[in-house]
Image (cartoon, rainbow, N blue to C red):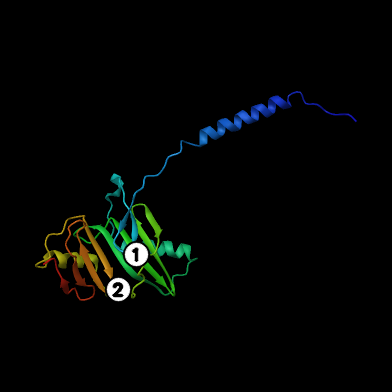
Amino acid sequence: MNIMRFPCLPCLAAGLVILLCLGAACTSGPAVQAPANTTQVPGGINEVVGNSSSQQMSYTLEDAESAVIQDYQAQAGGNVQNLSFFYIRGDQVDSSGKAKHWIIGILQGNTSSMRAFDNTGVSSLTMPPGLPVPEIIPSNILSPADIMKIASSSPGAGSLTPNGTTLELMNGQYTITEPGSGQPGIVINATTGELITTHD
């Protein structure tokens, strides 16, 4: 039997190994560990905390709802029938009702989920204990802008820190708190705008 020999085969194999090693070194960078940038917020929701100047964008609740519905629709294969919100929270809310970070609880049939929306887009969150709560119908509630006007003009509401306020909507009531203030929040009826409790 006649065996064919290729005198260049060992050189070709060595060259291929070197090429693959160099190619891999050019396409992979150093391993970088992501910073731990989550904080626990009341209600058991882990919130992503930004540390860059790009975190300066603020969004209306309508912006957040639209983005969350689109994300949910993409993940649910286009099915958004009977979709409702049971929880809404805005962090770093300004006097116009815009927030830098929104958390929205979604209910569709017996399935509930949480989504966060900020300048990085939409992300899923783990459902905290005690949720979902009774359904919220966004068309029947006052907007965050209206609630912030009511809160800032109400006697006993104290001063609200611009871009530092947390606005939470659950069980038909908005609760406005100042992180780190140590004071109970301002509670306002979400449909009538009636001031239920103040700092006083």
Q: Foreground: 161 or 191?
A: 161
Residue bearing the label numbered 1 = 104
Mark 2 is surrounded, within 10 Å at the Cα level, by few (under 14), some (14 to 19) or many (20 or more) other residues, namely few
Q: Foreground: 55 or 125?
A: 125
**Figure check: 45 above or below 34:** below
Secondary structure at badge 2 equals helix
Q: Quick one: quadrant of the C terminus?
A: bottom left
Mark 1 is surrounded, within 10 Å at the Cα level, by few (under 14), some (14 to 19) or many (20 or more) other residues, namely many
Upstream in sequence: badge 1 or badge 2: 1
Q: How far apart are marks 1 and 2 (CA)?
A: 15 Å
Residue bearing the label numbered 2 = 139
Name which quarter of the figure residue 73 lies in: bottom left
Q: Position of residue 113 (x, y in %)?
A: 41, 66
| Side of 179 relative to 122 (left or right) | left
| Three-letter code for the amino acid on which mark 2 is drawn | Ser
| Three-letter code for the amino acid on which mark 1 is drawn | Ile
Residue found farthest to the right: 1
| Side of 32 relative to 133 (left or right) | right
Secondary structure at badge 1 equals strand
**Figure check: 50 above or below 152:** above
Label 2 near label 1: C-beta < 8 Å?
A: no
Residue found farthest to the left: 155
Q: Where is residue 131 in the image (x, y as percent from the top left)?
A: 36, 69
Q: Position of residue 170 (x, y in %)?
A: 29, 70
**Figure check: 55 above or below 199:** above
Which residue is found at the position 43% from the left and 64% from the top? 72
Which residue is found at the position 26% from the left and 65% from the top? 168
Q: Where is residue 143 in the image (x, y as percent from the top left)?
A: 24, 68
Q: Quick one: quadrant of the N terminus?
A: top right
Q: Foreground: 42 or 13?
A: 42
